[in-house]
Amino acid sequence: MEALAKMTSDELSKKISKGKYMLFFSATWCSDCSFIKPSMPEIEKEYTEYHFLAVDRDENIDLAADLSVFGIPSFIAFDDGKEVGRFVNKDRKTKKQVGEFIDGLAS
């Protein structure tokens, strides 16, 4: 998974303007983020149509605020720069829940 460098909303918009992206917001101190991280390689292999970007919430605090991400771990899906879905809250997420979220994007 590519780690997203510190960037502004405008810079992010340019980066994700073509293709499907899944932003994964987390932080090193977040125990619920640590819970889902080991499952992320499997999730990435299962959903190859998405380019996954790891966003360190602390490093990108302004970007997280601009995208209304106030709880982590959280996921936001984009298709050609447009948000197509979000799984954003402060609750622990399982591999199954993340898969169900991504599966629901197709419908």
Image (cartoon, helix red, strand yellow):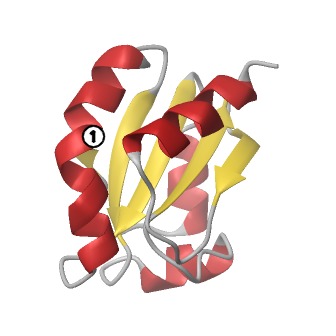
**Percent of width and height locating residue 58:** 33, 84
- Residue at 31% in and 55% down: 4
Residue 17 seen from this side: no
Quadrant that contains the N terminus: top left
**Percent of width and height locating residue 69:** 60, 75
The amino acid type found where label 1 is placed reads: Met
Q: Residues within 10 Å of mark 1 (few under 14, many from 20)?
A: some
- Residue at 42% in and 54% down: 24
- Residue at 21% in and 66% down: 34
Q: Nearer the viewer, residue 8 or 37?
A: 37
Give the residue at mark 1.
Answer: 40
Q: Secondary structure at mark 1?
A: helix
Q: Nearer the viewer, residue 66 or 14?
A: 66
**Percent of width and height locating residue 56:** 31, 70
Residue 45 seen from this side: yes
Q: Quadrant of residue 105?
A: top right
Residue 26 shown left or right of residue 85 in the figure: left
Residue 53 shown left or right of residue 104 in the figure: left
**Percent of width and height locating residue 60:** 39, 76
- Residue at 47% in and 49% down: 23
Can you say whether 70 is above or below 49 in the image? below
